[in-house]
Image: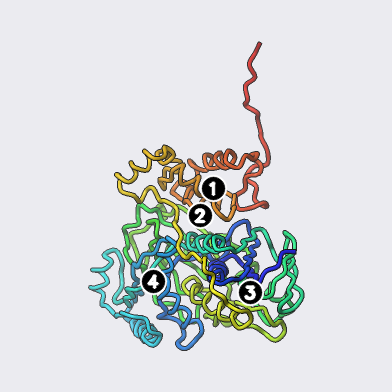
Amino acid sequence: MEQYDVAVIGGGVVGCAIARELTQYRLKVALLEKEADVCRGTSGKNSAVVHTGFNVKTGSLKARLNVAGARMFEGLCAELDVPFKRVGKLVTALTEAEVPELHKLKATGDANGVPSLEIVDGATVKKMEPNVGGVAALSVPTAAITSPFHLTIALAEVAVANGADVLLQAEVTAISGKEGSFRITTRRGAIGSKLVINSAGLYSDHVARLAGVRRYKVYPCRGEYFIIDSAKGGLIKHMVYPVPPKGGPGLGVHLTPTIDGNILIGPSAEYVRRKDDVATTRAVARKLLKEAQEILPAISPRDVIAAYAGIRAKTTPSSVGGFGEFIIEEVPECPGMLHLVGIESPGLTAAPAIALDVAQWVGRHLSLVPNGHFTSKRNGAVTFRDLPPEKQAELVAQDPDYGHIVCRCETVTRKELKAAIENPLGARSLNSIKYRARATMGRCQGGFCGPRVVDMLVNEYHVPLTEISLKGPSSSLFAGEVKDLTCTPQR
């Protein structure tokens, strides 16, 4: 049985940030993820926003970690070669009755240390965003966007480069033992660890129960989104939010430009029974479009190219609503195990700050000796379509695979797909390639490039077609061959 100093359960952005942070020290670290790749839960299905902290309760742990994480984010993305863009945010009041709420949000932001907040009038809103309505807005110039897929994957890759083991398809089924000698049983076998960090997101209450801790309850709250075609991406420059609904479980349906040029509409907020219920529904789709058009009338149903849903890990039931506090604690029932529960929005933003706090907790249990070989920097994948023509020509001359466009919607080359297929984590599904290289994310949603990517997976991995999956072993794309079209020469 392999022995570790620290086992981190959960391969979302927080778990991967923790694993990377701990590899700065001479610790043997394992990251356990139940899916076939990292970033498969809430971390990969959100608004991709780096929140500033103007709407988080002053004095709370969540506020401290939100503001601290936001300050760290740009530097972290630069180190990891991950996209980051400070586009700013407008929280718009559609009526005069909503304007007092803007002043309340500004007061909270000022108290939390959020810089450069300003209330602007309707004329200024129109100047900043000609296609957006509103009588006034809270301007948040330091708000930013990123790519949650690239960030989470990059954190995991840097952790691996610095000696961590990332164990995929390693769902935890039992936890026994005590501080210094935990035994963690997974579907891939058992490992031992001195300390355990429960960063399992939606399933953090379940993982806690495996260790005999029964004090937590996570309530799944679904958020549905639309993705608007990148051809309409120029309709807005900033993130555009409504005034948040009072007591609601979400921030309201907002419009968010993405790193890749699309616009996100959403999310909704409805409590659901199952933690894996990521269905998109007709009723919510209508609601999303209606509320989005109140802010941005220029969008239409024809602009929508895809829909998806993510699940928030809430600690407040539907009868209470609102937002609970982040829970980060070690409890008497299980010394040596740290629980991270209810890490919903702004969890993405707070992730690097949470990782620092967790490292300090580890330091109270184990000696933190700096890893003299730690490498913080990472060279991300080349994005061919974003390069100037002369650089593209240079790359094609170096490697003809850069001249072979496989995904036409997103201009993804064969070389980029090869790099994604050869990823350091060994993730091998179609979605793993999608989140690394954007193939199948365009308007045709894989209608053109999907079969070509599958063909590359078959040839690169030397496996039969039936072993190619969408997102892991339980999602095979092909049951078998219908016809064998191999021609046999006649004599």
* Vertical comparison of 115 with 238: above or below: below
The residue that label 4 is drawn on is: 241
Please state which of residues 450 and 90 is positioned toward the viewer in this rendering.
450
- Report the Cα–Cα distance between label 1 and label 3: 30 Å
- Report the Cα–Cα distance between label 4 and label 1: 37 Å
The first of marks 2 and 1 along the sequence is 1
Whole-percent x, y for residue 326 in the image: 55, 80
Residue 45 visible to the viewer:
no
Near mark 4 (Cα within 10 A), the count class, few <14, some 14-19 or many ≥20, is many
The first of marks 2 and 3 along the sequence is 3
| Element on which disc 1 rests | helix
The first of marks 3 and 4 along the sequence is 3
Q: The residue under label 3 is which amino acid type?
A: Ile
Q: In which quarter of the view is residue 463 placed?
A: top right
- Report the Cα–Cα distance between label 2 and label 1: 11 Å
The first of marks 4 and 1 along the sequence is 4
Proximity of marks 4 and 2: CB atoms separated by less than 8 Å: no
| Tally of numbered tags | 4
Q: The residue under label 1 is which amino acid type?
A: Ile
Q: The residue under label 2 is which amino acid type?
A: Tyr
- Report the Cα–Cα distance between label 2 and label 3: 26 Å
The first of marks 1 and 3 along the sequence is 3
The residue that label 2 is drawn on is: 435
- Report the Cα–Cα distance between label 3 and label 4: 35 Å
Please state which of residues 418 and 117 is positioned toward the viewer in this rendering.
418
The residue that label 1 is drawn on is: 421
Q: Residue furthest front?
A: 372
Quadrant occupied by the C terminus: top right
The residue that label 3 is drawn on is: 197
